[in-house]
Amino acid sequence: MSEPLDLAPSLESFITSNYSPSGIVAVAKDGEVLATHTWGDDGYDVTTPFRVASLTKSFTALALLTLRRAGKLTLDDEVVRHLPELRVDAPADWPTLRVRHLLSMSAGLATDNPWGDRQESLSRDSLNAMLASGLRLVFPPGSAFEYSNLGYAFLGEIITRLSGMDYRQYVKESIIDPLGLRDTRFAASELSTTATGYHREPALPGQPGGWWPQPASGPGAFSPIGGLYSSVRDLVAWTNLYLTRQPPEGARFTAADLREAQQGLTHRATMQAPAPLRGLVTGSYGYGLGIESYTDHGTLVSHSGGYPGFTAYMCWHVETGYAVIASANGTHSAAPFPARQVLLPLIVKAESRSEELEPWPETVAAVARLDELVRDAVSGDATEVAARYADLFAENVELDVPLARRVEYLKQGLVNLGALRPAAEPLTPKTPRPSVASWTVHAEYGRLELYIELAPVAPFGVQTFSAEIKNGQSRIELF
């Protein structure tokens, strides 16, 4: 950054509105904290553990993916395969409830935030009794989004049964310890200190407006929905893990698991992007993470969390590497709002670092030879030129439009363009995907636009070859 980040102006309105007694907002880039802003008297800093609530779901999801990686289950398994006592009350023509549905919030379980937030300390016996008592679905599994804490409690029970150890211990051994997360634990007793959470009565006439300490719930069968404590420094490391997709040595999860968790699976909504962003945004849910795909700004990944006494939020922008962590120690204290107030302007100002996908070697070679084909077409015999380059193409090309005819169309079309300019050295085609390329051949009176797509199987021949002449306002598609 060319100048220090000052977060105070963006946060002033939030802080003075008394959403919480204290809190912290921190900005990081590429895993390094750039700036923090704290308020209140509760001693927040980057090492202070606080309740992260539903941010825990990203840990639960990754833990489940490690068991899939170990061959213990597939995401398309029916839930009853692993929780055989489960009884589901749903019409007979509805799809079977599967593990993937629980992960991606498409199970059809009714949303349950007020109820679920109070269930953390529930015993496994009580959870298993819920399974057997019968669940009622509100829509066919896989057909829509509805946020469900209960579904993630079920995933935690599956993790316990398949791993042979308590869910919390498995997450600690498979994720928390390998990553060296010092402030991330499921019980306050395992930490030297934690931020205090508060609640207050509704803001009604005659009611006191102060904050009251909120007793913390203890770990239990619902810990998978939101039981973790963590800190800014640990959550910065956690978000950077997803940005870099570089697991530590010996981790039970892979870069592919981290990428898959950030893919939008269950559609939520498509709408106008919030200011100062532009265009449209499509929101969806992946595995323990929310995904926002912007037409103009790339991808924003996030999750919010709310528990009695706390709200928390983590978000990161894939194309710039920016991440923001927020914690506010009041019930319903809206931590996502200040975090986004800080992050969205940074996205607008920053230069994106779109992930470079290297073109296939066959794509690069095809561009070079087809550029030569165009130049040979100017004066060469169409049949002879076609034969010289026939080995480049997949079998469909000759069936769609014979190559010799394409060469003849090129020969005739190039008359209008005049002399061709020398080929660029080196050729720099646009390759939005590894198997796709487009490039321009410049001429005396205009240009020729070329486009190819390669087939998906060896020898990766050219399956699509198109050419268009552009001369002033005139556009002629040759083939």
Image (tube, rainbow, N blue to C red):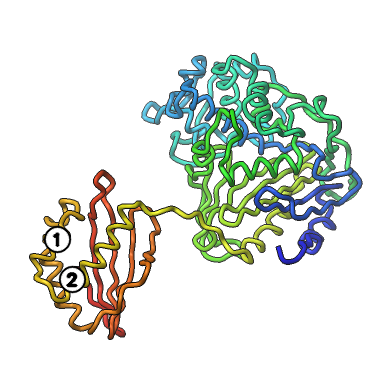
Closer-to-camera residue (102/59): 59
Q: Secondary structure at mark 1?
A: helix
Q: Is residue 29 above or below residue 92?
A: below
Q: Which residue is mark 1?
A: 388
- In the image: residue 327, left or right of residue 73: right
Q: Is residue 354 visible?
A: yes
The x and y percentages for residue 338 are 73, 55
Q: Say few, some or many: other residues with alpha carbon within 10 Å of mark 2 (under 14 / 14 to 19 / 20 or more).
A: some
Quadrant housing the C terminus: bottom left
Q: Is residue 467 above or below residue 137?
A: below
Q: Is residue 208 visible?
A: no
| Residue at x 52%, y 30% (from the top left corner) | 65
Closer-to-camera residue (52/92): 52
| Residue at x 64%, y 26% (from the top left corner) | 171
- In the image: residue 150, left or right of residue 373: right
| Residue at x 24%, y 55% (from the top left corner) | 462
Q: Are marks 1 and 2 in contact (CB under 8 Å)?
A: yes
Closer-to-camera residue (81/356): 356
Closer-to-camera residue (134/150): 150
Q: Secondary structure at mark 2?
A: helix
- In the image: residue 458, left or right of residue 42: left
The x and y percentages for residue 148 are 58, 34
Quadrant housing the N terminus: bottom right
Q: Is residue 2 above or below residue 78?
A: below
Q: Which residue is mark 2?
A: 376
Q: Amino acid at mark 2?
A: Asp
